[in-house]
Image (cartoon, helix red, strand yellow):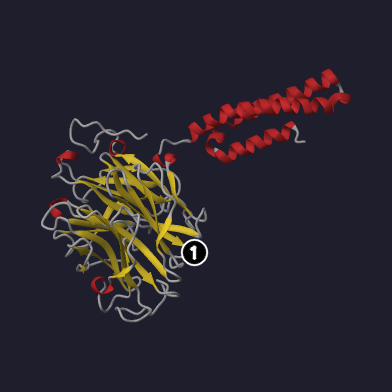
């Protein structure tokens, strides 16, 4: 039988495990209480009963004091929990994908979040049989029909069968209600960082682009269809990668209705950024001109629509400067201007997400242009941050921390007017969990902007 002292130590250990920061703040008080109660028990037992009744009373008082301390901790630990909760949105995050729980995957990575309206969200990721980028990955999906409160059991929608599928990048055609997911196929044994990957389209070891489509909200999917010849240059490019993130459908301008998917391309370490686009709902695709003057190694692009049918891309930057790179297109993504530093957008060699929340010609959103960005804000993959721009990505005056914990790759999507969802990798290495958290524009701006037309009441998260 455990003694009272052991019971106290056990309770303290559990408290430290669950709420280390809170216990650190209050440990002196509870330590004093524990020592006082233990001393009182010991003295009273010896004084009243003597040694001969020690064992019997010890058992009795163990039960009494264990119940007492359990009651104390039952009251105290919720208080600890309230103290420990930082008020950050990630405190209420919901797990969408969890490797090894009802699935065969060693890790799950590379989130892509897509809204298809009426609170319906589709979450995509790579289900990896090994903890590597080319780890015989499938494309997997989970669905929420209530704004991200609950999610369906993940399932594979494209199986690689020993090869690897990478970088799922979904886009939604609101006119035809079709979801298209673009991704890459690596042949078995081919790794992104290995030398002498063949360029072009014909070699059996070359990297190819594929797509799948759903016309019923993700319930069923077409078989993978190759689109390499219209989305990859015939020479000089051995690696292409879509996103990883979500694409966008243009809502205004001369190319209204166009589907645009962000890309990076080139030999490893000498990438440029570009995009592919479709004007017929994903039936056919064209490849844009690449950006010039890269000034360092960039990849992993995200994309958003700007006013008047323009497009902005933000890319991960591996070079000096510790900031991301940004470029704009004025013709719906067909050609791109000069790549510039984005000093307000911190870069720690991690993917980021970009989304258009509203355009200036949308009165339902107050006639303001709003573009959102998400990514880590520290020197490593922690402390997720959301930023917002009112001028098509030129400046980012609004920034707010999502949480203090792990935050690697992420993806943003509209949940409903006034609410945005963030799907993110929680762990820093060997990603096991992808989580979802909603935020309001009102929270992001500290009440200064609800993201709605004047007079409309801001939504409240429940």
293 above or below 307?
Answer: below
What residue is rendered at 18% in x and 47% in y?
Answer: 391
Of residues 61 and 446, the one drawn nearer to the viewer in this rendering: 61
Residue 125: x and y in percent read 39, 57
| Image point (18%, 36%), residue name | 453
Quadrant including the C terminus: top left
The residue to which callout 1 is attached is 129
Q: Position of residue 185 (x, y in %)?
A: 37, 70
State the residue lying farthest toward the top: 48
User: Would you say residue 8 is visible in this rendering?
Assistant: yes
Q: Nearer the viewer, residue 220 or 277?
A: 220
Mark 1 crowdedness (10 Å alpha carbons): few <14, some 14-19, many ≥20: many
Residue 327: x and y in percent read 22, 59
Residue 63 at what x, y percent from top left?
73, 27
Q: Is residue 156 above or below residue 151?
A: below
Secondary-structure class at tag 1: loop
Q: Is residue 374 visible?
A: no
In the image, 302: left or right of 81? left
* Lateral position of residue 461 relative to residue 432, left or right: left
Q: Quadrant of the N terminus?
A: top right
Q: Quadrant of residue 360?
A: top left
Q: Is residue 218 above or below residue 89?
A: below
């Amino acid at each position: 039988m455990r003694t009272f002292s052991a019971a106290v130590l056990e309770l303290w250990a559990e408290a430290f495990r669950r709420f280390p920061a809170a216990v650190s703040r209050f440990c002196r008080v509870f330590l004093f209480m524990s020592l006082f109660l233990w001393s009182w028990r010991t003295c009273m037992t010896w004084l009243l009963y003597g040694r001969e009744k020690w064992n019997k009373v010890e058992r009795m008082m163990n039960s009494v004091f264990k119940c007492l301390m359990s009651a104390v901790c039952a009251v105290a630990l919720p208080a600890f929990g309230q103290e420990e909760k930082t008020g950050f949105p990630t405190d209420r995050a919901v797990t969408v994908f969890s490797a090894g729980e009802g699935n065969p995957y060693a890790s799950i990575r590379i989130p892509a979040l897509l809204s298809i309206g009426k609170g319906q969200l589709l979450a995509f990721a790579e289900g990896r049989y090994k903890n590597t980028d080319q780890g015989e990955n499938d494309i997997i999906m989970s669905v929420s029909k209530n704004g991200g409160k609950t999610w369906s059991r993940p399932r594979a929608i494209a199986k690689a069968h020993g090869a690897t599928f990478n970088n799922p990048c979904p886009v939604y055609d609101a006119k035809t209600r079709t979801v298209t997911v673009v991704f890459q196929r690596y042949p078995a044994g081919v790794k992104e960082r290995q030398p002498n990957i063949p360029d072009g389209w014909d070699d059996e070891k070359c990297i190819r682009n594929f797509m799948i489509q759903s016309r019923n909200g993700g319930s069923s999917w077409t078989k993978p269809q190759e689109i390499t010849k219209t989305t990859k240059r015939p020479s000089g490019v051995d690696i292409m990668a879509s996103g990883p993130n979500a694409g966008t459908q243009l809502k205004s301008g001369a190319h209204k209705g166009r589907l645009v998917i962000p890309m990076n391309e080139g030999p490893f370490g000498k990438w440029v950024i570009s995009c592919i686009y479709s004007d017929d709902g994903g039936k056919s695709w064209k490849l844009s001109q690449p950006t010039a003057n890269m000034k360092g190694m960039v990849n992993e692009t995200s994309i958003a629509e700007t006013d008047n049918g323009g497009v902005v891309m933000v890319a991960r930057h591996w070079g000096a400067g510790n900031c991301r790179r940004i470029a704009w297109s004025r013709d719906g993504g067909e050609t791109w201007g000069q790549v510039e530093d984005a000093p307000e957008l911190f870069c720690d060699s991690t993917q980021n997400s970009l989304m258009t929340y509203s355009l200036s010609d949308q009165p339902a959103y107050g006639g303001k242009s709003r573009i959102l960005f998400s990514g880590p804000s520290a020197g490593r993959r922690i402390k997720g941050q959301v930023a917002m721009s009112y001028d098509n990505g030129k400046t980012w005056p609004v920034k707010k921390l999502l949480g203090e914990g792990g935050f690697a790759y992420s993806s943003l999507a509209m949940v409903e007017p006034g609410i945005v969802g963030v799907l993110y990798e929680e762990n820093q290495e060997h990603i096991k969990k992808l989580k979802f958290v909603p935020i309001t524009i009102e929270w992001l701006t500290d009440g200064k902007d609800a993201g709605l037309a004047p007079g409309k009441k801001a939504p409240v998260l429940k």
